[in-house]
Amino acid sequence: MNNYTKMPLLLGTLLISVSVPGYSQAQSDTAPRGAMVHVVITDMAVQDNNELPRLMKDDVKVKQGKTMYTVTQLIPARDQAAGLQLMILIDETLNIQAVGNNLTDLKEFVKAQPQATVIGIGYMANAGVNVVQQFTTDHEAAVNAIRLPRGGLSTMDSPYLSLISLVKGWPKQNIRREVLMITDGIDRLHGETPTASQLGPRFGARGTNGPTVYHSMPTISVDADSASETSQRYNVIVSSIYSPGVGRAARSSWDLDLGLGGLSKIADETGGECYSLGTSNAVSFKPYLDRFQKNLNNQYYLVFLGEPMKKGTLQRIKIWTEQSNSEIAAPDNVWIPGPQYNNNDKQQLELEATYVPITKRTSEPRATPSWRLTGRT
């Protein structure tokens, strides 16, 4: 029988006042209309050798199609608003010799995190995540949970399906939520069954010239698209560090390029970054982690009024600034709730994550995430 222990987790309490310009109860007919949307953006320097000025609300623009959205708040993610949930995912298919020494850099990064950052550690295999350390402010405990990957294959190795399972099991809280994946990005689970029109004259679809022909994937895994959309839907920023894996696919230039392309795609579309030296092994993770830390230090909560459709949906938006040396990284799409969730009449947006219970397994965790966080949805 499995034993469980309860442990409190301090995520910090954030209360952000969102005042809609021109809003009052008496003037609600003339107030800007829309669904209140909050998203985390990162101010990345165009040139790293220059300091980044602090962005103000009027510096940031949001547009959907030809429609400009009203920005109501821009709050730096620091001081009382510095709360961060960071999940570090390590692929079990990684080459142990290639990644081994670099895990020391990862441990030093975890140790250096501020108290407002809660960290979880998970290992990706079998299209799921083995969470070996639930979110904790005890960074030493998180460091102790980091181990070498197994360096082997499972029956369903897909970092994208693992990411999806994590994000869908992550209770929604209005706080910074980020994932750092360490993987080669190769989807070893899926190939491609082409249609008859894609096949040459000597081959055909089932029932013509024999069974359909099975090919390796001609493009980035379709699950990379799904992982990106799921992460954007639930407001999770995904960054990644490329590290070589094992097996035949890890020796295929084709698979290597597709894997790196999948990681880059997800990072770009969710507002994160993919760190790599092409498909070569990094001598050290430290430059990547330093860059990642700089991004964490230059993030903002952006609140704006979006135009709802009949029901909640992901909408393509553009977020930018004209400030010199500033380049904003943000999700390509944001979830805008339907009219039934229109909270324009609220004058405050609460970003709360207080003491919440976590159930921690004392035995070996399951292959899929066993979240016990209770959060506001």
Image (cartoon, grey):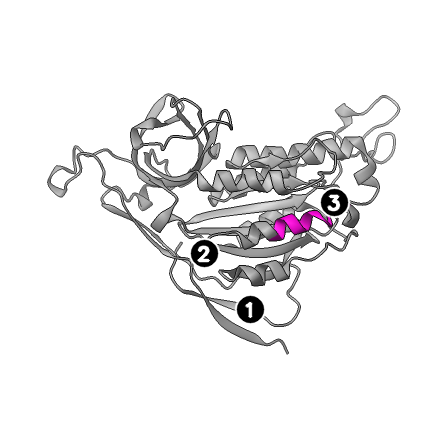
Q: At label 3, which amino acid type do we have?
A: Leu
Q: Secondary structure at mark 1?
A: strand
Circle 1 Cα neighbour tier, 10 Å, few/some/many (<14 / 14–19 / ≥20): many
Q: Which mark is residue 243?
A: none
State the image coordinates of residue 167 (x, y, percent, origin top left). 54, 50
Q: Nearer the viewer, residue 51 or 244?
A: 51
In the image, is residue 88 part of the stretch drawn in magenta?
A: no
Reading the image, the residue beneath label 1 is 360
Q: Nearer the viewer, residue 106 or 129?
A: 106
- Regarding residue 273, the answer to whether it shows in the image is yes
Reading the image, the residue beneath label 2 is 115
- Residue span colored magenta: 98-107
Q: In the shown orientation, is residue 152 left or right of residue 81?
A: right
Image quadrant containing the C terminus: bottom left
Q: Which mark is residue 189?
A: 3
In the displayed structure, 235 sits above or below 331; it is: below
Q: At label 1, which amino acid type do we have?
A: Lys
For image coordinates 78% across by 52% down, the residue present is 151
Q: Nearer the viewer, mark 2 or mark 3?
A: 2
Q: In the shown orientation, is residue 359 left or right of residue 161?
A: left
Q: CA distance from mark 2 to mark 3?
A: 38 Å
For image coordinates 67% across by 50% down, the residue present is 103
